[in-house]
Image (cartoon, coloured by chain):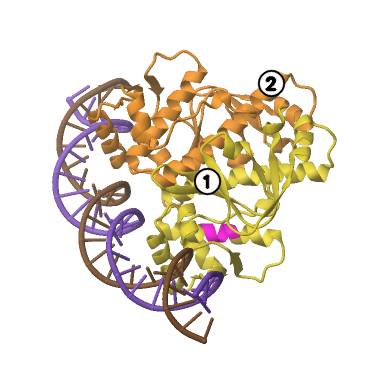
Chain colours: A orange, B yellow, C purple, D brown
Amino acid sequence: MCPERDDARVVARGWIARGAMLEDGRRQIVGLSLPGDVILATETIDTDMAAWALTDAVTLDAAPLRSAVMEGRDVSVRMLDAWRRSRSAERLRLARHVIRLGRLSAYERTAHLLLELYERQSRLGTTEPGVLHLPLTQDVLADILGLSAVHMNRTLQQLRRDRLVDYRAGRTILRDRPGLALAAGLSVIEDVSDESLPGD
Amino acid sequence: MCPERDDARVVARGWIARGAMLEDGRRQIVGLSLPGDVILATETIDTDMAAWALTDAVTLDAAPLRSAVMEGRDVSVRMLDAWRRSRSAERLRLARHVIRLGRLSAYERTAHLLLELYERQSRLGTTEPGVLHLPLTQDVLADILGLSAVHMNRTLQQLRRDRLVDYRAGRTILRDRPGLALAAGLSVIEDVSDESLPGD
DNA sequence: CGCTCAATTGAGGAGTATCAATGATTGTGG
DNA sequence: CCACAATCATTGATACTCCTCAATTGAGCG
């Protein structure tokens, strides 16, 4: 395989956003990559996609692991599973994101995303219950949820008034997670760790 | 691996929609599966996702091929490539769909989707230039694009007035593809066949 | 202290949704 | 062969979500 095709990286630290910038300045973030997630260069280079670091971020070259996975060479089962889990979870998140953007209101979208990020972050390690370390400006949040920054702000205020979430840059508190789940309008956010391992 | 995990199917004929139904009746279609595309059961069973046949459809069991791919057993290179191409193209389409729903207007979304489907269908085989075989009701189209059926209708009328598209059930004519691309507001729809083979 | 960047607020308007009918077409049983 | 039901496309009227523009406040920070 051409070497440049094999550019895969694993996020080691920080938050990275993948998305596209339109000519007229509109931006849509397609997904967030957190530590442990794999980013394929083909996802950004082949298309008009790009990736931005939202915080100080460190990524590691995952090309060796990747070609091993691809070519069926021996990788530890744990590694292989981790790879598949990660890719599979990402596909699921993409689908959820489509549903959010297509059918949920701004209020629902926000609740839904915050819950997903909380879930995701909990799985990454120690978190005080209900606290979400969210290093995103409202601008970025808006570009994830397909909203204007102004409306993003107002939506967050509404969630605060409703005592569901207390947003502040860096440290967001989910005051009422059951309430949030209700507000998200979608049944329950499943625990992705229960997921089987389709491995694309 | 558990057998039920390995339920993968390949679409042989027909159009299949994957998506979710919300409790209150809202529906969002996440993607369309056309002949040659792979559908993983885990994409529908693990979550609140479902799949609907939009036309008479036939799918084949792809579990054998899949486990072969997964376990690195010998599959013809062509097969392996086809698998990866398919999965990779799907990921790209999901990302594009997110951008459509997040940042494009109804008019832009529609133009964008029609072009994508035309591209996709051309690659499947013989098509008269400019003719898109589109076996979708406006209702379904609306559920793909995150619009109400009424607004979907009005948007299609607008495209017709602008002499870009002539929609009628089953047979849609893209009268002015450059114009459509312009209307789609996104640079160019890339030719996915040029794509490299990341293979998740 | 004047920057700059993020968050906030207000006012007005564009884009879509919703509700309720009306045609148009097609299949179906009498 | 016709009435009927069913589905899809279309239209009008109205309401609401969300956007845009413009300005203000507040919080670091050199």
Asked where in the image residue A148 lies, by quadrant, the reply is: top left
On screen, A147 above or below D10? above
Quarter of the image with the C terminus of chain A in it: top right
Local secondary structure at mark 1: strand
Label 2 belongs to which residue? A79
Task: Confirm whether residue B159 shows in the render.
Answer: no
Measured as percent of width and height from the top left, residue C5 is found at 33, 32
Chain holding disc 1: B
Residue lying at 61% horizontally and 32% vertically, measured from the top left:
A87
Q: How far across and down, in percent of the image, does residue B159 sit?
A: 45, 68
* Foreground residue among B112 and A91: A91
**Does B115 appear in magenta?**
yes
Identified by mark 2, the residue type is Met
Question: Which range of residues does the magenta coloring cover?
Answer: B113-117
Judging from the image, mark 2 belongs to the subunit labelled: A
Task: Tell me the residue that label 1 is attached to.
Answer: B19
Whole-percent x and y of residue C18? 31, 54
Q: Describe residue A182's horizontal placement relative to residue B69 as left or right.
A: left
**Nearer to us in this view, B87 or D15:** D15
Do the residues bearing badges 2 and 1 touch, measured as CB atoms within 8 Å? no
Callout 1, which amino acid? Gly
Closer to the observer: label 2 or label 1? 1
Image coordinates of residue B24 in percent, x first then y, are 38, 44
User: Which secondary structure class fits the magenta region best?
Assistant: helix
Callout 2 environment at 10 Å: few (<14), some (14 to 19), or many (20+)? Answer: few
Crowding around mark 1 (Cα neighbors within 10 Å: few <14, some 14 to 19, many 20+) is: many
Along the line of sight, the residue nearer the viewer: A100 or D24: A100
- Quote the CA–CA distance across marks 2 and 1: 30 Å
Judging from the image, what secondary structure is the residue with disc 2 in?
helix
Work out whether residue A109 can be spotted. yes
